[in-house]
Image: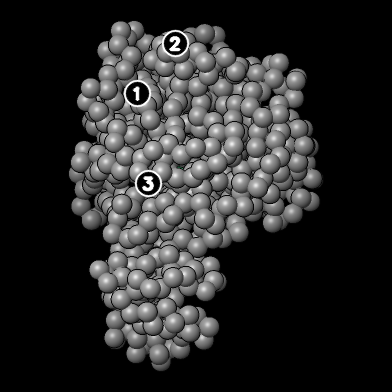
Amino acid sequence: MSQNEATQPGADLENLLHETRTFPPSPEFAAQANATVEMYDVAATDREAFWAQQARELITWSKDFTEVLDFSGAPVARWFADGTLNAAYNAVDRHVEAGLGDRVAIHFEGEPGDTRTLTYAELKDQVSRAANALTELGVATGDRVAIYLPMIPEAVIAMLACARIGAPHSVVFGGFSAEALHSRIIDADARVVITADGGYRRGKPSALKPAVDEALAKGTDVRHVLVVERTGQEVAWTEGRDVRWGEALEAASPEHAPVDVEAEHPLFILYTSGTTGKPKGILHTTGGYLTQTAFTFRHVFDHKPETDVYWCTADIGWVTGHSYVTYGPLLNGTTQVLYEGTPDTPDKDRWWDIVEKYKVTILYTAPTAIRACMKWGEEYPNKHDLSSLRVLGSVGEPINPEAWIWYRNTIGGGKTPIVDTWWQTETGAIMISPLPGVTAAKPGSAQVPLPGISADVLNEAGKPVPNGGGGYLVLTEPWPSMLRGIWGDPQRFQETYWSRFENMYFAGDGAKKDEDGDVWLLGRVDDVMNVSGHRLSTTEIESALVSHPSVAEAAVVGAKDDTTGQAVVAFVILRAEAVSRADEEGEGGDVVAELRNHVAKEIGPIAKPRSILVVAELPKTRSGKIMRRLLRDIAEGREAGDVTTLADSSVMEQISKGMKAG
Ligand code: WT7
């Protein structure tokens, strides 16, 4: 754990466990479901045989594997290691070869209302051309490619083109700043960046290319920038380095032989925030990752390729976009909707308009979005026919029972199963979730580890808690889509996940087991915040604040927020010069606005603190650790709790006084 005290799980979420409603699957749904209750037993009897069977049934191998799991190099697992395959072939080509070339892979809906349809045959053509274009630009198997794109079909095409040549992609969320993009390009040592002129957001074109130019100006080893033309806005151009996506693809052949890679060949790196200032490059490899994303997509969403229309609202910049926009759905030959923009453009019924228009049957989104829709009111969904929906999914943070019930009633017509899926960037695929058609759902609980997955809740001493008890969520056996490490930092991998409990993966979440043994997730127990389902590090935002010349010291906490789950609240001590300036301007004024923008510039707008409080001191223990628990009390409007371990117990009084005055 970091230098700050850990939060005790459970305390303020105690009330969750008073939720006792259950929603068993309807007999009709159960009768047609892909998943069966027997799967749990089969998997428990021989976990490795179970995963080997999934790997052979759901994935096409160019060379079959003979060994399932090798954990002799723990904590790094090797799955299906002597098998070979290609991810893009599995996601695209084999469906075309099976005669499904005319099936729609992607219904694209641009924010301004423009649309595009891509069949599997067209997707194969585009991915092949892009793979040839990347090769032409000197990208070889094993080279890293950074992707910085809006939610347009090219995002999926670019990822698959990389996979096709065995070049690991590193997708950087388009909302991240030039600074954040630069550090990720450097860490992964990317050779090419794929970006766009811009994308549409909130009714306007929003530029992306300038951030790439700015990132590269800081010095990188990037040789080329491939630029998709989306908005047509003017962009600066570096001759020789920058290449137009459209021209490059047109010049390229639509024929491309997918490169066979070993099962453990890196498929992608995806950066996520940890407890320190430096984001971690989570590494995923090919065979195990594809197996588990394909398996979970099929069973957790009860996907039927001939009839379902699937829509996941996540951006490809997050792991949900990797596993449940690009890989899981396409491996299963789904027809999916891809939407570029925000849920309230042009109006607050945009999502429901899309569901009606494409007759979406499976919707996968985040609690923060559901709560926002709740706040806007049911008049918006009620304007539309949502009767096509038959499975609803939730991911990113615990879903409060009230939002769960609203989701089921208002969006799901009071009948759809809801799958509350717990997983992480590190786990690669869904780990804990009800199975629709099998599990009697409990609003607010992710409930049961999937077949083939072993999880437990441990106490401080590392012993499993009894039913009714709370503690720390761990994964007790290796799983196929587990991270294979942190890019370039094996020691950090060991320390972050494998040092808290012996031989077990510690996820960083608190959890409880109810009387039936079902798991209720209670949020992070480390210095990681969850804002709108996005993971943010307190330390990373503190570093950003302290990098501003006006700031002497900063402490950041995640405060409860009705819509976003948590919100970033910062406490800063200003440097003397800045204090006198703030005094002249009155109550922090411009300094606070400046600091908020500074954080947006350093990390991205999602990291902008909701509020920044200028304080004279921070509450610290005698050994100098910041007591965030007390700051969280203040940020959530409570009296500060126990202050007896503070070096100076008057500090909290001063801070609360400052709050009341301000
Ligand atoms: C953290 C992982 C998984 C993709 C999106 C976020 C929280 C995620 C749930 C859920 C309770 C959840 C956990 C986890 N989380 N899903 N269904 N119930 N908490 O991926 O950015 O890697 O964040 O999100 O705290 O550790 P991520």
Q: Residue at x 47, y 16 (%)?
A: 43
What amino acid is labelled 3 in the image?
Glu
Q: Element at badge 3?
A: loop
Q: Earlier in the sequence, mark 3 or mark 2?
A: 2
Q: Residues within 10 Å of mark 2 (few under 14, many from 20)?
A: some
Left or right of residue 385: residue 119: left
Question: Which residue bears the numbered disc 2?
Answer: 53
Q: Quadrant of residue 483?
A: top left
N-terminal of the pair, mark 3 or mark 1, is: 1
Which is more N-terminal, label 2 or label 1?
A: 2
Nearer to me, 153 or 625? 625
Q: How many marks?
A: 3
Which residue has dot 1 on it?
286
**Comparing marks 3 and 2, which lies closer to the viewer?**
3
Locate residue 651: give its quadrant: bottom left
| Residue 626, position as x, y percentages in the image | 33, 68
Q: Quadrant of residue 508?
A: top left
The residue sitting at 29% across, 86% down in the picture is 577
Query: What residue type is disc 2 on?
Result: Gln
Q: Which residue is mark 3?
A: 460
Q: Residues within 10 Å of mark 1 (few under 14, many from 20)?
A: many
